[in-house]
């Protein structure tokens, strides 16, 4: 295959078997923590599921969500991690718990929060180690116990005192816009303290000024990609990186008051990105790792695609995107995602941890991709209910996110 495919797959597969400590954490690990495997890429993942449908019907959507959630929940229930990879999964499980009215997924995440005493990762200023705060805030909304956000509150008060470094923004890579901003805006909503929202908005704009490409209306992964090009000569825009941004946008919008003067900025960015992404959707409903050179990548990329479906469906559900144009994008995208579920519930075709478009095998499955799929499923389920004219707000429809 192109891009030294075989060699890259071996490297990615081995990397996926590492503990979450591989991704920058330090210090001793417990026996349980050593089991926290981000994902794997078996040579033979078995047959694809034959009992699922990608149709936009609530029962079908929920069946696909449950199959994937059950498979992933069983693999990580006794393996706590504070890493960003798992933090993404946790919000997906919490979303699935509400959509499917199944407390098991929530209980898994609550148990992990208790395990870590509701603390964040060890790097206080690093967006990746703040991401688990999204789960804490979601659980706090369900049960407003001050202990659940006490450590988050204290840490963010300290972080805000650090001056900006003009040479390197706090959120210098686009993935960070999913990891940290929803935690800051969520804490502002939970505490009614405007300082957190002001900090978030300032840093978001710093990152946007650096990485936003106004012509393509997409985000570079970081400033090292400004001059890099795909084989076809076009700029390198990573599918999952832009998925991170769109997912982060809607999660920030979840907690911003309707009359907040900063809200139009995020709505405008969501609309522009949705417009760009919709034009790049593949015939199978999904997006390739490199958005502007799809022909050079053999497989669709499920994690980035799931974030696109999630964000666009959210925009439709909140009447921020035109239904005539974007509803078919969601419909095709959801069907494409469901087509990559295996008989045992594994969600495949997920690019491993990386920073740019890369190679992987069809059976590659990683926790952050599952989390994105479950978030997407919850919004697609809500969209299907709205389209069918059924009441929104009953069991099986998630009304709000981390706030």
Image (spheres, grey):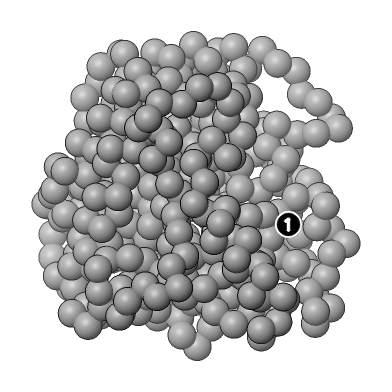
Residue 323: give x, y in percent of width and height: 39, 73
Compared to residue 296, the image places residue 138 above or below, namely above
Compared to residue 46, the image places residue 115 above or below, namely above
Left or right of residue 237: residue 133: left
* Of the pair 114 and 377, the residue shown nearer to us: 114
On the image, numbered disc 1 is attached to which residue?
Answer: 220
Q: Residues within 10 Å of mark 1 (few under 14, many from 20)?
A: many
User: Going 78% across and 74% down the picture, which residue do you hit?
Assistant: 230
Q: Quadrant of the C terminus?
A: top left
SS at mark 1? loop
Residue 217: give x, y in percent of width and height: 69, 63
Left or right of residue 69: residue 353: right
Left or right of residue 45: residue 164: right
User: Going 45% across and 81% down the picture, which residue do you hit?
Assistant: 285
Q: Quadrant of residue 212?
A: bottom right
Residue 369: give x, y in percent of width and height: 44, 58
Residue 332 in view in this figure = yes
* Of the pair 135 and 258, the residue shown nearer to us: 135
Residue 153: give x, y in percent of width and height: 46, 15
User: Going 25% across and 21% down the picture, which residue do you hit?
Assistant: 144
Compared to residue 391, the image places residue 76 above or below, namely above
Residue 387 in view in this figure = no
Q: Quadrant of residue 6?
A: bottom right
Give the number of marks. 1
* Of the pair 136 and 262, the residue shown nearer to us: 136
Q: Quadrant of the N terminus?
A: bottom right
């Amino acid at each position: 295959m192109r891009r030294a495919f075989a060699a890259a797959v071996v490297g990615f597969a081995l990397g996926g078997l590492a503990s979450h400590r591989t991704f920058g954490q330090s210090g001793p690990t417990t026996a349980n923590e050593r089991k926290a495997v981000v994902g794997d890429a078996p040579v033979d993942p078995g047959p694809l599921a034959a009992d699922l449908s990608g149709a936009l019907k609530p029962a079908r959507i929920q069946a696909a969500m449950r199959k994937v959630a059950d498979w992933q929940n069983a693999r990580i229930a006794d393996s706590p991690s504070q890493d960003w990879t798992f933090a993404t999964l946790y919000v997906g499980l919490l979303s699935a718990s509400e959509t499917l009215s199944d407390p098991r997924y929530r209980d898994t995440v609550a148990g992990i929060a208790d395990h870590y005493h509701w603390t964040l990762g060890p790097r206080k200023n690093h967006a990746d180690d703040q991401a688990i705060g999204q789960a804490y805030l979601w659980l706090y909304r369900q049960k407003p116990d001050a202990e659940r956000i006490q450590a988050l509150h204290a840490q963010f008060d300290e972080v805000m005192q650090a001056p900006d470094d003009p040479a390197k923004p706090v959120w210098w890579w686009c993935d960070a816009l999913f990891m940290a901003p929803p935690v800051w805006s969520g804490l502002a909503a939970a505490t009614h303290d405007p300082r957190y929202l002001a900090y978030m908005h300032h840093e978001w704009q710093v990152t946007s000024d650096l990485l936003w490409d106004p012509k393509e209306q997409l985000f570079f992964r970081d400033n090292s990609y400004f001059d890099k090009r795909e084989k076809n000569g076009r700029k390198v825009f990573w599918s999952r990186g832009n998925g991170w941004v769109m997912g982060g946008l809607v999660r920030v919008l979840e907690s911003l008051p309707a009359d907040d003067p900063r809200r139009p900025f995020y709505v405008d960015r969501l609309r522009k990105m949705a417009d760009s992404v919709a034009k790049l959707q593949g015939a199978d409903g999904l997006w390739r790792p490199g958005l502007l050179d799809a022909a050079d990548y053999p497989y669709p990329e499920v994690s980035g695609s799931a974030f696109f479906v999630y964000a666009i469906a959210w925009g439709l559900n909140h009447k921020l995107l035109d239904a005539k144009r974007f509803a078919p994008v969601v419909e095709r995208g959801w069907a494409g995602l469901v087509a990559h579920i295996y008989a045992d519930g594994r969600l495949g075709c997920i690019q491993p941890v990386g920073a740019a478009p890369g190679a992987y095998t069809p059976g590659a499955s990683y926790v952050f991709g599952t989390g994105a799929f479950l978030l997407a499923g919850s919004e697609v389920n809500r969209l299907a209910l709205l389209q069918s004219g059924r009441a929104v707000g009953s069991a099986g429809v998630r009304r709000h996110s981390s706030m």
